[in-house]
Image (cartoon, grey):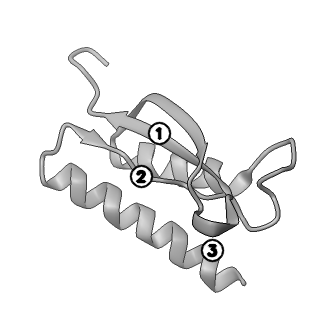
Amino acid sequence: MAWMKDKKFDRVATDAADAWNEGLPFFTPILMPPTGQGGMSGRIADIEQMMAIIIGVGWQLHTWAVGSGGGASGRLSAMPLFVRPGPGA
């Protein structure tokens, strides 16, 4: 299932870059953990990598929330709010 993970990372990279290039002040993706990891404690490497991709575009993490937004499955999802860095950042 590596191709699904790569597709997920590519989509986040494209969306983050598009929002940045459009000059938007905010970027608000929904990041889903891998299936089967939603109820477990510990690191979620997929979300860490997606957030690193977004920060690499230039966005700065402002705040985030976690909720069950995965449709009928009720999977947990991370909802970060990224902003453009302020002066002197």
Q: Position of residue 2 (x, y in %)?
A: 69, 81
* Type of amino acid at the residue the image marks with label 1: Pro
Image-quadrant location for residue 81: top left
Extreme residue toward the front, this view = 72
Q: Position of residue 60 (x, y in %)?
A: 39, 32
User: Could you tell me if the residues under marks 2 and 1 are in contact, i.e. CB atoms within 8 Å?
Assistant: yes
- Label 1 – label 3 distance at C-alpha: 19 Å
Q: Find numbered disc 2 in the image and state the secondary structure of the residue it sits on.
A: loop
The residue carrying mark 3 is 5
Q: Amino acid at mark 3?
A: Lys
How many C-alpha atoms fall within 10 Å of the one at disc 2: few (<14), some, or many (≥20)? some
In the rendered image of this protein, does residue 12 appear above or below residue 26? Answer: below
Element under disc 3: helix
**Residue occupied by mark 2:** 29
Residue 80: mark in rendering? 1
- Disc tally is 3
